[in-house]
Image (cartoon, grey):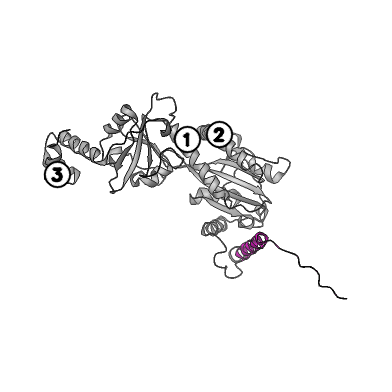
Amino acid sequence: MNQTPPQTLVSPSATISALRLAGIAQARRAVLLDSGPMPAGSLAPEVERSWQRCLGFGLRPLDPISFAEVSAQQMRRTLDDNQRLVQTAKPVLEKLGRAILNTRYFAVLTNSAGVVVDVSGPIDRSDPRADLITRIGTDLSERSIGTTAIGTALTELQPVWLHRGEHFFDATSVYSCAGAPLFGPDGACVGMLDVTGIDAVERPELKHLVTQCARKIESALVLSHAHSLLLRLNWPGTALGSDGDGMVCLDRDGWVTGANSAARQMVPELSPAGPHGVPARLHVSEMFGIAFEMLFDAARRAHATLEIPLWTGLALQVLPIERAHETSPVVANPRTHRAQNLSLRDIEDALIHKTVSDTRGNVAEAARILGISRATVYRKIGKPR
């Protein structure tokens, strides 16, 4: 009697994984071997751009990779130049290492050139595939080892996820990795944070985790930066005190000395403008419609939470926190401070009085500077302060 053999059940995740790898393989044939059209959606645009750059460098997928280390002199200079980055990132890397402990992934921190400056997590040193890419001083740049999360994130300046064959070289197709660039207080890229697994299950959610950790490192870099006043920013209705806060550092005269990525996204004037990502010298009065002295006054009075208008017409919550000692970091958690909300009308009134005072009572000039009518200025200054 013939019996039909039992069907082997295949999990949906295994099917998705097989289809994903098949799509990557077809994309490799289309782009790297020029063997036909690439299926739509089979490859992220940033990965294809990286592949094209690698081909432009003269690299080929079957080339051997040396995972070269920089010279001893370069290594000393690299460690000296990135000492603050390594020390600031260390607590975040330790927590990240614990978070990925059971995933067969580990963390790598590089400088802006893609040279390894620190690592964390469960690294199997007996496996050369892990050991080679986690040696301090190894050059993991795009020119050196082709498309990886490290080289792609540093070039594209955005978080990325790469799985197996999305890496350029055949020899690196054992890796899966997520990477996010790191930006310093001046807005320039200072390095990147990477999480890599070897022959590991694809975990694209690690892109979110590594991006969140990168933002924490950036905020810690801002807090360690020289400043007299720290401004924590967020939109009205959002509680201040989270990792999503924007942070801006000011000197005693109200000039911006540093900011994190969140602040640069909230305030257009903070966006990098130069070829190296560093904005021109900026005063806080160019960001907000408020005299900078009010921010220092609010910090000294009661750590007041202000609602301050931007020149775009939007408004932000701002918590100014004065730094007690120039050489010591600020513990800037607004949940430990008593919030005293000032209304937008109070801020506007104070700004008008300040402008009239600065113009020595010239109401017409004050109205021109503020972009309001003289009648409005007269009405406001006629009110008791």
Q: Residue at x 30, y 31 (%)?
A: 298
Q: CA distance from mark 1 to mark 2?
A: 10 Å
Give the dominant element type of the magenta stretch: helix, strand or loop. Answer: helix
Q: Which of 107/36 is in front? A: 107
Residue with the mark numbered 3: 376
Secondary structure state at the residue bearing disc 1? helix
Q: Which residues are magenta?
A: 1-29
User: How far across and how far down the image is residue 67, in percent?
Assistant: 64, 45
The residue carrying pointer 3 sits among few (fewer than 14), some (14 to 19) or many (20 or more) residues within 10 Å by Cα, namely few
Q: Earlier in the sequence, mark 1 or mark 2?
A: 2
Up-down: is 79 above or below 364? above
Farthest right residue? Answer: 1
Q: What label sits on residue 243 in the rendered view? A: none
Up-down: is 271 above or below 47? above
Q: CA distance from mark 1 to mark 3?
A: 43 Å
Q: What label sits on residue 220 in the rendered view? A: 1
Q: Looking at the picture, which amino acid does disc 1 mark?
A: Ala
Q: What label sits on residue 91 in the rendered view? A: 2
Specify whether residue 112 is in view.
no
Q: Is 2 covered by the magenta stretch?
A: yes
Q: Looking at the picture, which amino acid does disc 3 mark?
A: Thr
